[in-house]
Amino acid sequence: MRINNFWNRRGHGCRHGLSKALLLGALCAAPAGMTLLCRPQMAAAAEAAAQVVSVRGEVVVRHGVGDKAETPAVVGALSKRDEIETRGGGAAVKLPLGPEIELSENTVLAIIGGKVDLFLGHGTVRVHRVGDNKPEGRALLIQGGQGRVALKAKEAQVRVEGGVLRVTVFDGSAEITGSGNKPSKGVVQRGQMAELRSDGTISQPEAMPVVAQQPSVGEGMQAHAPVVMKDDQKPPIDRSTMATAVLRDPLQEASGGHPPVPSAQVLPPPQLVVSAQGTSMVPPPAAKQPFAEWTTLRLLRDKGMISQPEYDSALHDMMETAGQRAGDSVTLVLGKWATTLYGFVQGDMMWNSTQSSNDFISNAQIARPGTYAGDNGRMVFTVRDSRIGVRVQVPETKNLRLSATFELDLLGNTGTLSAEGTAAGPGTNNNVTEASYFTNPVLRIRHAYLKAETPIVDILFGQTWDLFGFLPIYVPTIVQWPGNVGGLYARTTQLRVSHTFKSAPVNFEMAIAAMRPPQRDSMVPEGQAGLRLVFNKWTAVHTTYMTSTAVVPASIAVSADIRQFSVPEFTSAPKNNTSIISKAIAASAYVPIVRGTKSNKSNSLSLVGEFVYGESINDLYTGLTGGVTNMALQAVAGVTPAFNPAIDAGLVAYDKNQFLRLPTWTTFMVGGEYYFPKVDGHLAIFGSFSRSKLSDSDQFAGQATAPTMANPAGTPSRVRDNEMMYDVGLFGDPVDALRIGIDYAHYADTYTDGVTATNHSVQAVGFLFF
């Protein structure tokens, strides 16, 4: 049976996510007109069932009568069981009853005939009623693996991707029927869209914003009546001119040969023009698009105004802040430029058993027991982690996709309040009051970068996540503000080049980046590189921090970092410097335990983990210094000279032997999250455990304790040996735009002298996403 080859050849079973059995089941369950497809011994000879009227780019045809070979598509007849596939281009196919079907790039369509007209395996088709221009006429039946769509529409779009069949009706109506013994049914009216999911459920139709009203005849649009000819009046087909007969589209010609941008406007049907050169379909002039429109990225994609790769790129850039909600963020279209506004308002309540930090703990030193700050607690309310972002994308061309992202939060350098119990004294530093610190926070840049995506490489320039650790993919679920103990969390300015090799089962990503050097006097950029393997079909639900919930495939990654430092010689009046190079490596993994999918997020269970070993990398963690300082210069006449290392604290330091040393850190983190049944990912519990270790802590100086009888020499008590943290919590979404969460965290900070300082933290948070 020829239809078996539709998925067997060239790996289409994996590519389109439909098994042969599913396809055969769907077709055999069709009305009587489909019976012959399930009985190959009764198949009739091939018959003309459709006509290719235009071809653009790489398009192939596979003929259905015992021929498995692919041939380049040309304008001409198609028979029943023929398949047409658009790879690097597009095509238009006209059916005998009048509808014209436009195939977008990466679409596979089979010509069926009978009561079921077409089978859409993957991709997007746009349906125009050409000869039969009445919605109440015979419905066009399109079958998919999820079910079927009966179109009584002048203008509609059907898309199959990721196990979901999506129908958008611009004019007319459509009836959706799911597969199975008791199929669900739904109706989509003009200006609506709906989804038929792989489990057979149909989403509620969503209203589409009206882009423009259809002009009536006499308002600048000429009415065209289709030319109807009897068979004996049709001109003979000239095979020599088939390849040159194309669909003349003024929108496509104006865009330099790229496919037109569909919209919600209803256009008059194309005109069948007969000339001495042959027959071609000529659509009337398109109605003028509005210059400005408020919409969403999801609607832009569903209307064909942006491609699926453009949509995926936008979600990737906004995922860490907005998660899957990014597709529904408010987008302003000006001309062909799309600007998306996204972010959230966040409120936190933090209770800590010590006064070790102003608000979030992160990797801060825990106040030692027996001190005022170590024996007294603190309660804080803050909105400083709220965020706002803007993403701009310009019209996509054949080989270039350009975008820019600019994101801010309120964690700017207001002036840091000192922790009570320190030498600076309670609440004093830079004349910043508590009221100013918490109620007048300063904007800070989180991301500011431009991105150019091409078929060869993707190029990113600006400030964003470090490549080391493939941030933020492996950030665990947690209410405590990241980065936490032992968790990488860093952003900086960089120039990154990457490429992802994609296939149905796996993706393989390679990237290399030149980063802003951690010390400006080094004169050499920091270098980072990474490899990441993604298993596309092994998925579960993952939430990064509290903000980004998405269905994420299993992955493993390894990344490396290399840095060069140039430090003045150890004297109060240096003339020379010492150069030294540090190295680091990170291994990361995300492992689904119980599967979660886009259509069913319930009962998902997964683990995320990270291991890092490296030198001079404390700035890649939030607030980490470990108490590392340079030893003091020898006093002269009772006065200790000052030494300026010209570098941020903790990166490198002269140890107790006056040797320039690279502090060596080993950190690891593992986190788990479980999403409760029957709530589709809207309620979850989570927990994590992490640890950081300064391997050479005994070699660094610190604030020494006073000599005692038990310890006459004193010890460097301000240098950390290791720190451990564990937490457990719960979060939920009362409505889609609102998320609340709470967790408990325990911190244990062990100093070089063996003293362990602990902090208990309870934090509650609320987010309103926009």
Image (cartoon, grey):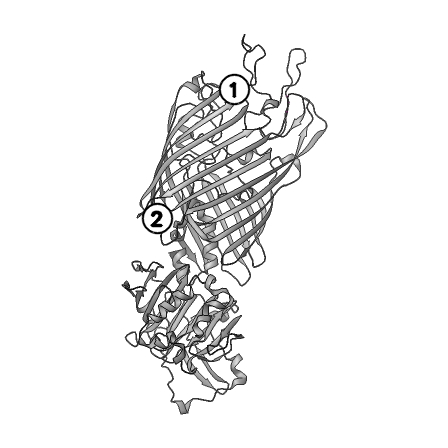
Q: Is residue 189 left or right of residue 423?
A: left
- Residue 688 lies in what quarter of the image? top left
In the rendered image, residue 731, in percent from the top left (x then y), is placed at 35, 40
Q: Secondary structure at mark 2?
A: loop
Q: Quadrant of the N terminus?
A: bottom left
Q: Amino acid at mark 1?
A: Gly
Image position of 497 with respect to 193: above or below: above
User: Can I make out residue 623 in this image?
Assistant: no
- Residue 633 lies in what quarter of the image? top right
Most common SS among magenta residues = loop
The residues tagged by marks 2 and 1 sit, at their Cα atoms, a distance apart of 45 Å
Residue 711 is marked as none
Of all residues shown, which one is farthest toward the right?
A: 576
The residue that appears at 43% across and 32% down in the rendered structure is 726
Image position of 50 with respect to 12: above or below: below
Callout 1 crowding tier (Cα within 10 Å): few <14, some 14–19, many ≥20: few
The magenta region covers: 641-645
Residue at numbered disc 2: 602
Let me know if residue 610 is in the magenta part.
no
Callout 2 crowding tier (Cα within 10 Å): few <14, some 14–19, many ≥20: many
